[in-house]
Amino acid sequence: MSAKIDQATAITRRQLLRRCAGTTLAVSAVGALTACGSTAGTPLAPTADLPADGDLVYLDVATSERNLIARYTETLAAHPQLAPGLQPLLQQHEEHLAATGVQVPDPPTLAPPSDIRSALGALRQAELTAAVERRASCQRASEPELVRTLTFIAASEASHIAVLKSIGEDR
Amino acid sequence: MSSQKARAIAVAGEDAAIYAYGVIGAVLTNTDRRRALAALRAHQSWRARLAAALPAGTAPAPGIAYDFPYPVTDGEQAVHLAQLVENRLVVVYADLAAAATGDERADAVLAASECATRAVVWGAPSQAFPHGA
């Protein structure tokens, strides 16, 4: 058993950095890992009367992403000069929302702070809240592929906090 | 994938990252070198934590050397390698999170978040689903 693990990890270790060489290689490496992940674990069998826990987690994530999209959209409308920094983050939240496959209504509108630094601080706080919520979602999810997706979303949102901080420092 | 196998792969990934940061830190200077050394310590800490969770004697041994995708001889290459290493590890930790449960899963999500954050701090663009490219 340990020999097998050593063999498998020796390959992974050698390939980890090599696979960083270019987009195509990296994407194929991710694809290979996805294929491994999809064979692991047992999907939760939904009951007839209640939505599967995965469905509830997706709904929570979709609600949270829709909320973040609204905050970014409002902030961009109030501070269009932030577009170069904020547009990519907004786009990434739209990708997170699309990954849930769930439609949720828009949240109530909220006027962003008129001061740019405060507006960026409000977005940082919203991202922090979302990242913490995604970590909690991971504990409630059973299906491995869902946990994997949520981990990527949590990591993406955590990284957004650093992006927003650097945008704030430039001002 | 079993959680034990995913854990062993994460140990191997951290070994590669630790080796890479040794080279990255040697090439960089001043603030960037301090940042590389802080990242090195973080990866050493996660490596120790993961290895402690494996049955005695089953943690993969670190490689003597690792292949880089390109020579790392200047600051720009070193910074780019740091971005790649961090984003690749996000994928490794996402696999561990999917295979693990409870505290180990929570740790894997946290480690993935730290790696994605360090990639961005090293200047990589943020990604919706962070991976190596």
Image (cartoon, rainbow, N blue to C red):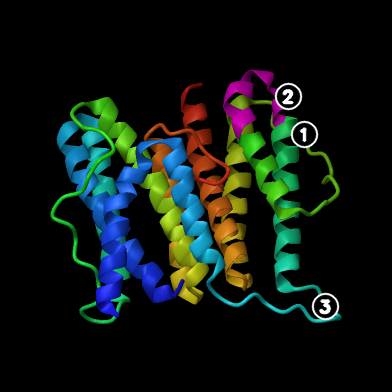
Q: Left or right? Give the position of A118 relative to B113.
A: right
Task: Tell me the distance, in whole angstroms, between the alpha carbons under discs 1 and 2.
Answer: 8 Å
Q: Which mark is residue A78?
A: 2
The span shown in magenta is: A75-88
Residue under circle 3?
A50
Based on the picture, tell me whether residue A85 belongs to the magenta stretch: yes
SS type, badge 3: loop
Q: Left or right? Give the position of B14 relative to B115.
A: left
Q: Chain of mark 2?
A: A
SS type, badge 2: helix
Task: Name the residue located 26 percent from the left edge and 77 percent from the top edge.
Answer: A2
Residue under circle 1?
A111
Task: Name the residue located 15 percent from the left edge and 37 percent from the top edge.
Answer: B26
| Nearer-the-camera pick, B70 or A138 | B70
Q: First in sequence: mark 2 or mark 3? A: 3
SS type, badge 1: loop
Locate residue A95, reporting x and y percent.
67, 43
Of badges 2 and 3, nearer the viewer stands 3
